[in-house]
Image (cartoon, rainbow, N blue to C red):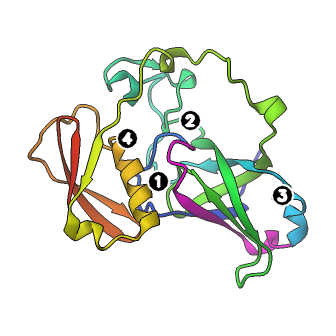
Amino acid sequence: MEITPIATFHSPFNEKFGIPRQSGIVDSIEGYIVFYEQFRNPDYIRGIEDFDFLWLIWEFSANKHQAASPTVRPPRLGGNARIGVLASRSPYRHNRLGLSAVKLDKVELNTAQGPVLHVKGADLMDGTPIYDIKPYIAYADAHPQARCGFVDSNEWKTLEVNICPAVARLLNEKQREALEKTLALDPRPHFHNDPTKVYGMKFDGMDIHFTVDGKILNVIEL
């Protein structure tokens, strides 16, 4: 089977570093979907506005190499313990396909780019190819009592984020909220622990510089 993209995703993340590792955990991140010309007939999305959430099937397009090992090291396990790639959500997979549930925020039918879907909570990089879109159906898709393997026994550890006043003045309220929630998830590789190292992350057209000392992340420059 050959598959081709139907749309492109646009988000504040211009590179992989810093993107939340799951969809929905930073629900204030805004993005939008622009369809390729042959899919801009509004009939393709007729009725989609009646759903609160959508499933996106997309490609880890920024990965330059194929998965080479049957096991991976999930960040949730500290970056050292290994688990089978098919028992994980690692982006390094043999078919490079991603699956994300996103909140449908708004539908615009008549724009210069055709119909546009505005969503929140996505974990996709800007320019990501979208292969398919399906409505999220709660009675079939939600299993709140399900066991979740190693995720159940490894609590997500977050950081306290401090943004210096000089940087805070350059951010609007939406940008600041999304940036704080994103940085609180600790975008660094889990084996990094140098309080003097300055990290750079591209976000919404800006280059964010920050340091991490213990459980405190300090945004020091934009």
First along the sequence among labels 1 and 3: 3
Residue under label 3:
48
Q: Amino acid at mark 4?
A: Leu
Q: Quadrant of residue 68?
A: top left
Segment tinted magenta in the rendering: 23-41
First along the sequence among labels 1 and 2: 1
Q: Quadrant of residue 50?
A: bottom right
Which of discs 1 and 3 lies nearer the camera? The answer is 3
Residue name at image x 91 percent, y 67 percent: 43
Residue under label 1:
62
SS label for mark 4 = loop
| Left or right side of 89 for 170 | left
Residue under label 4:
185
Residue name at image x 68 percent, y 23 percent: 144
Q: Amino acid at mark 2?
A: His
* Distance from the alpha carbon under mark 2 to that under mark 4: 27 Å
The vertical placement of 200 against 158, above or below, is below
Return the mark for residue 94: 2
Q: Amino acid at mark 3?
A: Ile
First along the sequence among labels 4 and 3: 3
Q: Position of residue 59 (x, y in %)?
A: 59, 50
Circles 4 and 3 in contact, beta carbons < 8 Å: no
Judge the density around disc 3: few (<14), some (14-19), many (≥20) Cα neighbours within 10 Å: some
Along the viewing direction, whichever of 24 and 34 lies nearer the viewer: 24
Q: Is residue 52 magenta?
A: no
